[in-house]
Image (spheres, rainbow, N blue to C red):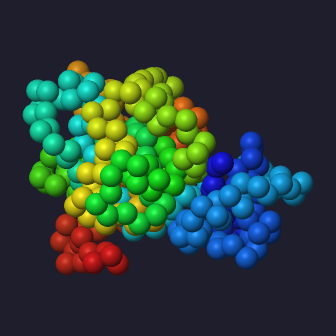
Amino acid sequence: MKLATFSDDEGLRIGRVDGDRVLDLAKAAPDLPRSMMAFLGLGRQAMARVAALPTAEDAVSLDRVRLHAPIPQPPKFLAIGLNFHSHVAEAKDVMAPAQAQVWFNKQVTCVSGPRDPILLPAASSRLDYEGELGFVIGSECHKVGPDEARAAIAGYVVVNDVSVRDWQIASPTMTLGKSYPSHGPFGPWLTTADAVADPQNLRIRTWVNGELRQDASTRDMVHSCIEQVVHLSERCRLLPGDVIATGTPAGVGALMDPRRFLVAGDIVRVEVEGLGCLEQRVVAEPAATLRSAGDPERGRSSHG
């Protein structure tokens, strides 16, 4: 089953994707929540109920709605670094192989939808892509083993861990180079875990302007999705709606010779087998969001 968060002139809500249409749950099951976070909190019984709903004749064409990230405001957005053997190999001259799982935080204000533009910051031209498999936590877990970890995953998504490389390198935690607004797109919907036979056997591909840049399989992961949940849950409590990005394979622009960073006008497409794709245009940061270097308000935001 595929579950989407979408909007039109009737507002933001969730639905079940059936082919090229979306069944509006606000109409098909009006007693259910309108947000994916609240829906996930209802557990497996709610999932089973939605899966059993018949396809409605008045289901809305996906062309007529705007798709948002399935969880527009996740509690946490965590990502693992150097988790594909191929990426470790291509990065060997600039980063030492990790001795343990290496995690960083993407600020949740970076989240954007699967068709929303990717902003090229005025402060840097070193904008890069990272096509990834992601998953969403469906039930609270802490200090769990492999079986509990598997049960805690609600479903899988496509992620582009968009990165500003100079900001990333300047900060040991990498967070500042991973959290610019629009640099956390994921979706296009949540494919429930029961519909993914083996998350460790999925093809990941990334194109820039039609040129294939990344082509790999999740078989190449250093640490599996289940191992990631076990590791993280030992150290922090994972909550329904938390988004986990599982690492990128070889082929990022920063490690090509010569380097090939994204520029305004580029079209980036990330696809994970069976889960759909993100397809987004890179656009220059709007002038209205910029402040002069002498402005005392420079750098401030409503997020503190």
Left or right of 140 on screen, residue 19: right
Q: Quadrant of the C terminus?
A: bottom left
Q: Nearer the viewer, residue 226 or 71?
A: 226
Residue that appears at 32% across and 57% down: 144
Question: Where does the image place residue 86, in percent across and percent down from the top left?
Answer: 27, 24
Q: Is 249 placed above or below 284 here?
A: above
Tell me if I can see residue 200 in this picture. Answer: yes
Quarter of the rendering containing residue 27? bottom right
Tell me if I can see residue 106 in this picture. Answer: no
Q: Is 14 placed above or below 157 here?
A: below
Question: Where does the image place residue 276, in percent across and percent down from the top left?
Answer: 58, 39
Q: Nearer the viewer, residue 273 or 143?
A: 143
Quarter of the rendering containing residue 48? bottom right
Q: How many marks?
A: 0
Residue that appears at 46% across and 29% down: 201
Left or right of 254 on screen, residue 149: right
Residue farthest right in this picture: 57
Question: Where does the image place residue 15, in percent across and percent down from the top left?
Answer: 69, 59
Q: Nearer the viewer, residue 104 or 67?
A: 104
Left or right of 196 on screen, residue 296: left
Residue that appears at 72% across and 54% down: 51
Residue that appears at 51% across and 26% down: 210
Question: Where does the image place residue 57, in percent across and percent down from the top left?
Answer: 89, 54
Q: Is 197 placed above or below 293 here?
A: above
